[in-house]
Amino acid sequence: MIDKKLLEKDFDNISIALAKKGVSVEVLEDLKENISITKAKRQAMESIQAQQKQLSSQFGIYKKENKDISQLQTQIATLKQEKQKLEDEVKTNEQTIDDIIMGVANIPDPNVPDGKDENDNVVLETIGEKPTFSFTPKEHWELGEKNGMIDFTRGVKLAKSRFAALSGIGARLERALINYFLDFNRQRGFQEWYVPFMANSSMLKGTGQLPKFEDDLFKIEGEDLYLIPTAEVQLTNLYHDEIVSKDDLPLLLTSYTPCFRKEAGSAGRDTRGIIRQHQFDKVEMVAITSQKQSEEIFNKMVQCASDLLTSLGLAHQKVQLCTGDLGFSASTTIDLEVWLPGQGKYREISSISNTLDFQARRAKIRYKDGKKNLLCHTLNGSSLAVGRTLVAIMENYQNEDGTINIPEVLKKYI
């Protein structure tokens, strides 16, 4: 959630910055007007309270002196009604402000390049060498079916389209990757957690999935519960409405979970294979930091995910997202895109974001710095999307006969 005081103080510049993320100036002007009206009503309430206090003191004096108090009683009763009316109006206005501000995206960092969409993202660095083949490399869905690793037909039968079933070495590789990722992150200082795969609406509001992206969530009928779209929701909200000690920061957390997304708006995209599924496995990194630590930790998380890909022998590139491609909660994001020889292009496999205090303000995550309680900064990143890593291994380690080699670091897990 953006800072309302900052919006009031620097409305023009904030409006310009948020317009780059698609937030209309009309929405912000409506927000500003409601904030201004609410402030004026509060001031009127304070004025009435002062009048009530003054009249109440007179009331006691009048009673002592046996003076007529009927006029004072009428004035006090009138003030009480006026105050109650203002209180009701302020409550309504505050709800309106909350409804608007919960749908306003985070302010992009000044260093984020301007752009409309993914075509304006900036490649920062390319790591590793693409494999060369003496044959035309196959795409993962061909390899998956040939090796009995992925069963698309049965996945659809069990659920619906955009579901798949893994078997044999495919299932074992999926499990191996999860264990390897968790071990790798733990060695980099991330504490491992195992969290619920469902979250209530308060937690999803805390990290920004609600109310903006409700259409992309699977809701449990009759319950205030949703299947989580990412472990970011749970790991970040472990400290929901808590004050942590500055000495405990940064908190580095990692967890494996399945992730569930309706993929609303993705009709016609990646309809073949397992690149874009309704259910997929992911190992997530989350950091909760002081305001001064977040940039350093952001770089650490990007490097951790990049080193993980390097350890698997997978060529990839670091990509700085432009303003128009930034996620709702992100102030800055670097994507890691892995090379897929079957598709002949790089595809996103990890997305690491610094949200600054945006999520912490929504989730009330604070730390004590001396006598002050300050908002934490929160960061999140994939480390990695397991299914997409499986795809990358299949395509990069394929042989001419369709068999697939296993990366050295995974052999002990299989």
Image (cartoon, rainbow, N blue to C red):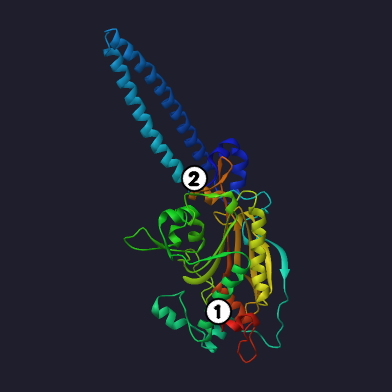
Instruction: Give the crowd class for mark 2: few <14, some 14-19, many >=20 residues within 10 Å.
Output: some
Q: Is residue 9 left or right of residue 45?
A: right
Depth-wise, is mark 1 or mark 2 nearer the camera? 1
Please, what secondary structure does the residue beneath circle 1 have? helix
Instruction: Give the crowd class for mark 1: few <14, some 14-19, many >=20 residues within 10 Å.
Output: some
Q: Nearer the viewer, residue 6 or 343?
A: 6
In this picture, is 65 found above or below 372? Answer: above
Which residue is labeled 2 in the image? 101
In this picture, is 359 found above or below 72? Answer: below
State the separation of the CA atoms marked 1 and 2.
42 Å
Q: Is residue 66 left or right of residue 353?
A: left
Q: Position of residue 217 (x, y in %)?
A: 43, 62
Q: Position of residue 49 (x, y in %)?
A: 40, 23
Disc 1 to disc 2: CB gap under 8 Å: no
Q: Residue at x 34, y 29 (%)?
A: 84
Which residue is labeled 1 in the image? 176
> Please, what is the three-letter code of the amino acid marked with disc 2?
Ile
- On the question of residue 356 being in view, the answer is no
In this picture, is 162 found above or below 235? Answer: below
> Please, what is the three-letter code of the amino acid marked with disc 1?
Ala
Q: Nearer the viewer, residue 202 or 218?
A: 202
Res 54 label: none
Which badge, 1 or 2, is on the more N-terminal residue?
2
Q: Residue at x 64, y 71 (%)?
A: 308
Please, what secondary structure does the residue beneath circle 2 have? helix
